[in-house]
Amino acid sequence: MLAATAALAVGTSPAMAANNLIKNGSFELGSPGVNGFTYWTKTNVPDNVPTQDQPASVITYNNNSSYPNGAYGERVSPDNVVSASPDAVGTKAAYFVGDFSNNEGLGQLTYLGVGNYRVGFSYYLTQNGLNNVGNSSFSATIVGIPVASTVINGSSTAKVWRYASGVGQITLAGWYDTRFLFNSNRNPSKDIVIDRVFALKTTDAATVIIPPSVTAVPEPATWAMFGIGFGLAGSRLRRRKTLVAA
């Protein structure tokens, strides 16, 4: 039986699927800044006290601006790593920089049917962030279970795009909280840039089993069929009443 442990794959490209279940996984739909996370729900956002404990922000590539529109004056090159994400590389990325982040997250409620799902992200470490003394980590989770993760420490390499992913097995269809989490605990801590976040149906073997912690519900298409059926039944009933009245 598979154990519920995190999985990491760097620089490899599993079989790609056509549809990214994560909306705005490349962070292209919002404006630069801390409020640019369209479709995302932010959790455990740092309170900016002390000043260095700042929340995640959408930044633009090749931009030497300071936070929150850039990485403190350091230009970040566009994501160029081979990834399972079907999304194209755009002009923006997400920048996590808090020094005391405790599961600072970006999440979405995603419908997952029974089967295996590859979840992952591209990541990049700035040189100025890697020079900070505190370590940090970033992980992709489904209902709080780590599926893919990376740790940023003194042996990490700056200014290189890398890729992390893992495969979670869903045994009960339903809506699942898919969340990407940043953790740090020292001032100053190492930061991280994230892009092309994704969740895809896959035939690859699972590396972690996701417990069935949600209520089973029909797929969205099934709900639509229910609606059509109820509509037809109502139409026939109204027609019958009209004929009787006539």
Image (tube, rainbow, N blue to C red):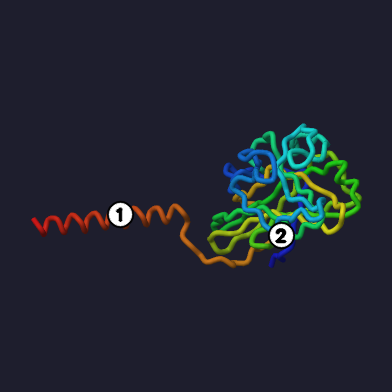
| Secondary structure at numbered mark 1 | helix
Classify mark 1: residues with Cα within 10 Å, few (<14), some (14-19) or many (20+): few
Q: Is residue 222 above or below residue 13?
A: below
In front here: 201 or 189?
Answer: 189
**Residue drawn at (12%, 56%) of the image:** 243
**Residue 103 percent location from the top left of the image:** 73, 59
Q: Is residue 19 above or below residue 103?
A: above
In front here: 29 or 213?
Answer: 29
Image quadrant of residue 68?
top right
Amino acid type of the residue tagged 2 in the rendering: Pro
Amino acid type of the residue tagged 1 in the rendering: Gly
Of callouts 2 and 1, which one flags the residue occurring earlier in the amino acid sequence?
2
Q: Which residue is mark 1?
A: 231
Q: Is residue 58 above or below residue 224?
A: above
**Residue 200 percent location from the top left of the image:** 61, 49
**Residue 92 percent location from the top left of the image:** 69, 37
Report the Cα–Cα distance between label 2 and label 1: 42 Å
Quadrant in which the N terminus appears:
bottom right
Image quadrant of residue 64?
top right
Q: Give me the disc on residue 146.
A: 2
**Residue drawn at (16%, 59%) of the image:** 241
Quadrant in which the C terminus appears:
bottom left
